[in-house]
Every structure is written in C-alpha cells, then in structure tokens.
Image: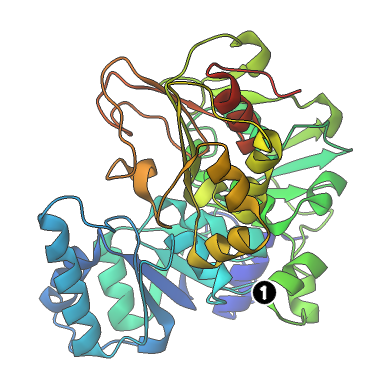
C-alpha cells in the first residue's frame, strides 16, 4: 500500500516497518522552537518535571519576536527568564529581535526536508513548505521534549489538494489558501495533514508555499506538506538526498479526502470580520472604506510580499488619512528590501516601516486600532480583539490586494 508524505516522514523517523493514519507513535524530535511568550512557562514546567539537563541544547532554538520591543513592563520578565534559562542550560541558538520565529527557523537553516519539528506557536506548520513535519504544541509538551527529545503523536489522516494551471494576474498563494480555508471551514482539517501537489504548486516560490503552510492551521490542520524540489534545495542550501526527493504522496496512498482546483478559477479574496473562514471575493467588497493597511507577519512579511506592495505604490502615495504599516519578517529581509530599493519606494509612498517581528499581528505593538476602525492585513487571523479592541474590523488579504487598498483608502480589486 502506498503512503502519504506524513506517513513517510514518520516511518523514517521512528524506524517502524509500517505507519498508518491513526497509529500512536513516539517520534524523535529533530528541532524545537520556543518563543518569548512561552519561555517562562516552559522553563517553570521543565524544572517542575525534575529535569536537570537538556536532551540536546543544539537542537533548541529560543526566539524573541512577539514581545519586542517591550510594550508593557511584564514583557521584560519574559526576557529575563529566557536569558537565565539559556545561560543555565547552555542554549546556543538564541535570537533577540532577529525576526519572526517561523521565518527564522527556515531562513537560518534550522529546519530541513523530512525533519520532525515542534514549536510553542500554532503557526509552526509553516515549515511544511520545505517538506518538514512541523506542528505547534503547548508548554507542558515542550518541557517534556526538552528533557527527553521525544514526543508521542497520532499519525494524521491526510487531505490531498491538487492544483493545476497558471494563476491569473494579481492572484497569489494567499488567495489560494484563503479560498481553501473557506471551502474546508475553520475545523474542516482538524488534526489532519494537508498535502499540496500539482503543477501550480510546483510553480510557487518557497515564500509562497510558506504562506500556505502557515495558514493551514486556520482550517485546524496538524501540518501542511509540500514535496521538496530544487527550489527547496536552493532555499535550504542543501543537495536533496534520494530519501528527501521521495517525500511525495504515492498514487495508491490512502487519503481521507481529495480536493482539486484549476488555478485559472482563483480570484482575489478576503477573509471578512471576524472569522478566517468567512471568505468573500474582493469584487463583492469594493468600496468599503478603511483606516489602515498592515503588510507583514509570518504569513506575508517576506521579500516577495514587500516587493508586491512596492510595485503597486511605486511613484504614488498612500491615500490620505490611511496608515500603511510595513513589518519585514526578519532582519535579512529588511536588509534585502533596502538593498534592492523596495524600502525606498515604500517610504516615499508614505509607509510606516517597523522593526522585524510579530508586532501588530499579535496585537502587542506596531499600530493597534480602536473602536470602529477597519484594517486590511496580510497576516493569518482576524479574530475579535486581535489588533486592538473587539470593535475593530479586520480583513485578511494578499499583499497585492493590500497595496491597492492602501493606495485608494478603500477595499479595491487589484487590476
């Protein structure tokens, strides 16, 4: 019997003779990520469990990204506890304000195809873009991994998504994943793996695949997986092994559901307030006035995203009374955007450019809104109170759509 990608990864990791959806297995963890919000709780639970040393300090990454720069005094407590934990147990991979955790984990080379990775954030699913099984967990589970290097899981069933054809102009991977979430529903993929294939997927950049893997959790998915290819090898700066190349769903693999799309049928869409699966075509929302546009986050803060907005705004200015906030996903992306002139275009258009990090996406800093205000954003969640008060309306869109909205001061169809 054939196997899905997730079954192949887990079989290789565990050394089992066979692995099927529904099996309970213990995996050997290749890497973990802890961010600044959770480090106090992980540290406390780790010592409460009686551990006195880490299973492998080199496989643990601590990243300060949600709470930097500090916006309330309690944030500093997280930094102090994190620093103390890193010093006490000899952590060697600590990033202080280098960017968003999910960007850094692949960008800095911590995650490779076929790896098993866990992180203290739901959007850890992002690393499936390079063919890794990655998923978010809580601080108790993380503390256990820090001491043992292992984790038990149930092998997920898989939903296969096939997309063929060429995407229309101004339609991006963000529109694809939003449409899919709308079709599946917010719980339509709960504890399942999403496996993406088709020639449209092959055409996508790693950044675009990261956008889709990142938002898979918004349909409840345990993980999202893309077959490693030459784009993966270039991004990860590796030569793919035969085993890594074989991470593709077999023709006779068992899937719990199969969904097929034709790329030409996709159009620009938005997730409307206040559910990620409330998806509407942009053409049906045209004219709704907005107060702010946010381009950034672990979903769409990469170089191609910033370049897409700059292309829309080049030689133009942001609409009067509209704030455009640009937050690069990492220092490296910030530097690249400066070097190729993207930042200059955005600055000249009137954008507010912030420090790399989570910022407005997690509602801590960088442009929170108040009652009655409306924002078009490129991040992954539009829940009530996510970016300010519970009376803020959040529309999720692609960077291209967001750029057009910033230009006109209202929801606008990119064309």
- Say if 203 sits above or below 230 in the image: above
**Residue 6 seen in render:** no
Q: Residue at x 25, y 61 (%)?
A: 38
Q: Position of residue 319 (x, y in %)?
A: 53, 22
Q: Position of residue 361 (x, y in %)?
A: 39, 42
- Say if 342 sits above or below 134 in the image: above
Q: Give the side of residue 204 with respect to residue 383, left or right.
A: right
Q: Give the side of residue 119 with respect to residue 257, left or right.
A: left
- Say if 367 sits above or below 284 in the image: below
Residue position for label 1: 236
In the rendered image, which quarter is residue 247 located in?
bottom right
In the image, 189 versus 398, the foreground residue is 398
- Say if 338 sits above or below 90 in the image: above
Q: Residue at x 59, y 50 (%)?
A: 344
Q: Give the side of residue 374 with respect to residue 256, left or right.
A: left
In the rendered image, which quarter is residue 73 located in?
bottom left
Q: Residue at x 71, y 40 (%)?
A: 311
Q: Position of residue 29 (x, y in %)?
A: 46, 76
Q: How many marks?
A: 1
Give the colour scheme shown: rainbow
């Amino acid at each position: 019997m054939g196997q899905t990608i997730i079954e192949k990864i887990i079989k290789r990791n565990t050394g089992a003779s066979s692995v099927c959806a529904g099996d309970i297995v213990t995996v050997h963890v290749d890497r973990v990520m802890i961010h600044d919000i959770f480090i106090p709780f992980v540290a406390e639970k780790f010592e409460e469990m009686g551990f006195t040393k880490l299973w492998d300090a080199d496989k643990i990454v601590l990243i300060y990204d949600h709470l930097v720069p500090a916006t309330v005094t309690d944030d500093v407590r997280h930094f102090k506890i994190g620093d103390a934990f890193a010093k006490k147990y000899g952590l060697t991979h600590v990033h202080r304000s280098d960017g968003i955790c999910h960007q850094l984990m692949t960008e800095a080379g911590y995650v490779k195809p076929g790896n098993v990775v866990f992180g203290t954030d739901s959007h850890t699913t992002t690393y499936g873009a390079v063919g890794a099984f990655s998923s978010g967990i809580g601080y108790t589970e993380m503390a256990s991994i820090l001491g043992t290097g292992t984790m038990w899981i149930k092998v997920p069933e898989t939903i296969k998504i096939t997309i063929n054809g060429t995407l229309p102009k101004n339609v991006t991977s963000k529109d694809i994943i939003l449409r899919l979430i709308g079709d599946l529903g917010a719980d339509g993929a709960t504890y399942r793996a999403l496996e993406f294939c088709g020639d449209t997927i092959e055409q996508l950049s790693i950044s675009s695949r990261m956008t889709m893997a990142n938002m898979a959790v918004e349909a409840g998915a345990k993980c999202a997986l893309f077959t490693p290819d030459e784009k993966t090898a270039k991004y990860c700066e590796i030569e793919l092994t035969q085993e890594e190349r074989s991470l593709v769903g077999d023709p006779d693999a068992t899937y719990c559901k199969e969904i097929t799309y034709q790329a030409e049928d996709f159009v620009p869409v938005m997730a409307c307030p206040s559910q990620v699966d409330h998806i509407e075509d942009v053409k049906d929302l045209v004219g709704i006035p907005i107060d702010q546009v946010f381009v950034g986050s672990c979903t769409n803060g990469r170089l191609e995203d910033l370049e897409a907005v700059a292309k829309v705004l080049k030689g133009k200015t942001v609409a009067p009374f509209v704030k455009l906030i640009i937050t690069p996903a990492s220092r490296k992306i910030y530097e690249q955007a400066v070097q190729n002139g993207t930042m200059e275009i955005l600055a000249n258009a009137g954008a507010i450019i912030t420090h790399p990090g989570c910022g407005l996406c997690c509602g801590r800093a960088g442009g929170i809104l108040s009652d009655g205000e409306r924002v078009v954003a490129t991040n992954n969640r539009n829940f009530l109170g996510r970016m300010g008060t519970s009376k803020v309306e959040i529309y999720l869109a692609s960077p291209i759509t967001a750029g057009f909205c910033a230009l006109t001061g209202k929801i606008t169809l990119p064309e």
